[in-house]
Image (tube, rainbow, N blue to C red):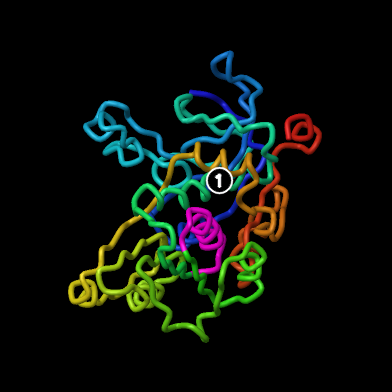
Amino acid sequence: MALLRVMMAGICNTDLEIIKGYMNFRGVLGHEFVGLVEDGPTEWRHKRVVADINFACGSCPLCARQLGRHCFNRTVMGILGADGAFAEMIAVPVANLHLVPEAVSTDAAVFTEPLAAAFEILEQVHLQPGTEAVVLGDGKLGLLVAQVLHQAGAQVLAVGKHDDKLAVLRRHGIETCTLDRCGSANADVVVDASGSSKGFAAAVRMTRPRGTLVLKSTVAEPSQLNLAPLVINEITLVGSRCGRLAPALRALAQRRIDVASLISARFPLRDGEQALRAAASPGTLKVLLEITPAGTAATCA
């Protein structure tokens, strides 16, 4: 294990859903973070790092197939059986560490984990150049997914409820539409990043027959699902969760993804409850928790 001093952490929708009861988690929240290695192997000490959030056993059949993110015995940072990064220090398996390139600011590096989740879609769904895709949801993840699919050559339409959030995408040449004006949009690939229990039904309606629906939302609220349209329209349903961090770090280093526009506010760790309330406020994007004292962070950012 390596002992990390957390520099910065981000609050995501999953954290807010856990507070409502998702996963029945008890412990320290937080899985989007950047830290400094305080103790561990010599080659890692004092390095600025991010980390895979799934702590795999390394010995089960899934681990043998390089599927540690789905390990039968895994714990998950701040989500399942392992404390998270809303703390001054955190212990992480050395195998999970990833060096943050010098070209990536600490603010940007906080987005590594959710950006990796966006890139995971490209590993699960084969996109031909020009594939028509709808991204439903204009929260943090939806804005990242839309950028990733756009750069992969898809013809993306981002659909959300907040025109000011969608404006982030329009600045990068991505078509957008508010839900009240284009609720009838449809495409061969639809990504539900709405973060709402009602988003699934809307996403199903937007998916063309024999299309692919990718589920990215984690929601504590139970919902009743009408699965008949999936059968009738022969829709392929893809659950999509965590992704590999390396593609995300490369994209951040090359400044191919706009994450700076997604930062709404920042708070010190001592104001964590206020930060969580701010993150849950309508219209808010990413809220950052500044954890390491500024003098220490300045030497490594």
- Specify start and end residues of the magenta stretch as a single range: 137-154
Q: Residue 207: x percent and y percent?
A: 34, 73
Query: In which quadrant of the rendered view does residue 63 lie?
Result: top left
Q: Is residue 237 left or right of residue 214?
A: left
Report x, y in % for residue 143: 56, 62
Specify the farthest residue to the front.
129
234 over 267 or under it: above or below:
below
**Residue 151 included in the magenta stretch of the image:** yes
Magenta span dominant secondary structure: helix
Amino acid of disc 1: Glu
* Percent coordinates x, y for residue 301 in the rendering: 73, 35
Q: Which residue is mark 1?
A: 32
Q: Which quadrant holds residue 89? A: top right
Using a 10 Å C-alpha cutoff, classify the residue at mark 1 as few (fewer than 14 neighbours), some (14 to 19) or many (20 or more).
Answer: many
Label 1 element class? strand
Residue 225 part of the magenta segment: no
Q: Residue furthest bottom?
A: 181
Residue visible at 40% across and 34% down in the picture: 55
Q: Where in the figure is residue 223, as x and y percent of width and height?
A: 32, 73
